[in-house]
Image (cartoon, helix red, strand yellow):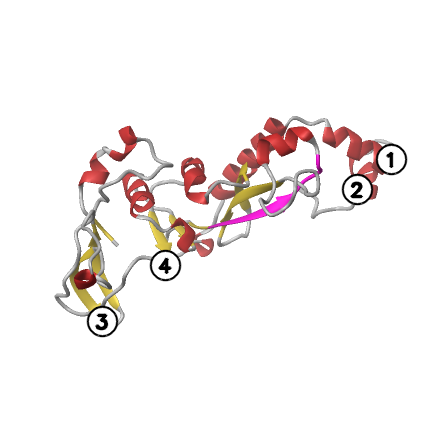
């Protein structure tokens, strides 16, 4: 990879050692996963330290975060660890893993990869990505990672985020609009009202709001973390 994704058959010329493609693949399989994780972390740290100002957005390092999945060989170990789609009968499908990948927006470099079981949500593993980021970094993600708790964690770490609003989050640009406090029982009278307090309108489709702390702690966040100072302070969205 460091030689521009050179083909396996070209590796003997690069290394000066004689071996077959099959032997190289067999040897690569024996590498512990921790070694590959360490190499990825070292490569990302070295590359990010050498980033030029042109690769930043308004002086900020910017990262893209998204989830995907892939199937794996049908072995008992992988089935127990990751599981398979519920619509497939046991013994008729392949185990599938969820992947949460962090890329640097300026270079496209893969900075971190979180591997998780199929029946889990990206939000429950997103905190594993945060240590890779530094205060002042900008994280760009889709609506699957847009929640008040995740935003609070980002603010607590000194990070910025650009997230598409969640599907269930009401958005209203009406000046001095009414809002609903978290934990309020849903009734026909409050249907369609946003659960955020408007602060200031900057334009027809641009506003500053405060998201209030939810009454319940999300299942992926331990209660000791949710009672931190950042979660008791209104924050801007």
Please tell me whether mark 3 sits on a helix, a strand or a loop.
strand
- x, y (%) of residue 14? 78, 39
What residue does disc 4 label? 167
Q: Nearer the viewer, mark 2 or mark 3?
A: 3
**Mark sitting earlier along the chain (2/1):** 2
Q: CA distance from mark 4 to mark 2?
A: 45 Å
C-beta proximity under 8 Å, tags 1 and 3: no
**Mark sitting earlier along the chain (4/2):** 2
Q: CA distance from mark 4 to mark 1?
A: 52 Å
Q: Nearer the viewer, mark 4 or mark 2?
A: 4
Seen from the viewer's position, the closer of residues 89 and 200 is 89
What residue does disc 3 label? 203
**Mark sitting earlier along the chain (4/3):** 4
| Residue span colored magenta | 65-74
Q: CA distance from mark 4 to mark 3?
A: 22 Å
**Mark sitting earlier along the chain (4/1):** 1
Q: CA distance from mark 1 to mark 3?
A: 64 Å
Left/right placement of residue 206 relative to residue 65 reads left
Q: Examine the image and state in which quarter residue 189 appears.
A: bottom left
Left/right placement of residue 29 relative to residue 179 reads right
C-beta proximity under 8 Å, tags 2 and 3: no
Spot the residue most to the left.
176
- x, y (%) of residue 7? 78, 46
What residue does disc 1 label? 20
What residue does disc 2 label? 8
């Amino acid at each position: 990879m460091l030689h521009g994704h050179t083909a396996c058959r070209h590796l003997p010329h690069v290394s000066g050692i004689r071996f077959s493609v099959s032997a190289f693949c067999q040897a690569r399989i024996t590498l512990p996963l921790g070694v590959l994780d360490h190499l990825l972390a070292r490569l990302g740290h070295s590359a990010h330290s050498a980033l030029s100002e042109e690769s930043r957005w308004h002086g900020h390092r910017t990262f893209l975060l998204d989830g995907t999945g892939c199937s794996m060989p049908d072995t008992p170990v992988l089935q127990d660890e990751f599981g398979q789609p519920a619509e497939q009968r046991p013994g008729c499908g392949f185990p599938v893993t969820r992947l949460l990948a962090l890329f640097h927006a300026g270079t496209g470099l893969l900075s971190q990869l979180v591997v998780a079981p199929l029946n889990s949500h990206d939000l429950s593993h997103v905190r594993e990505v945060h240590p890779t980021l530094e205060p002042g970094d900008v994280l760009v993600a889709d609506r699957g990672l847009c929640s008040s708790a995740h935003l609070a964690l980002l603010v607590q770490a000194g990070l910025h985020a650009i997230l598409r609003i969640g599907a269930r989050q009401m958005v209203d640009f009406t000046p001095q609009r009414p809002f609903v406090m978290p934990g309020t029982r849903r009734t026909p009278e409050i249907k369609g009202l946003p659960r955020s307090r408007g602060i200031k309108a900057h334009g027809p489709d641009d506003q500053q709001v405060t998201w209030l702390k939810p009454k319940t702690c999300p299942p992926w966040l331990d209660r000791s973390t949710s009672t931190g100072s950042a979660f008791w302070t209104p924050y801007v969205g």
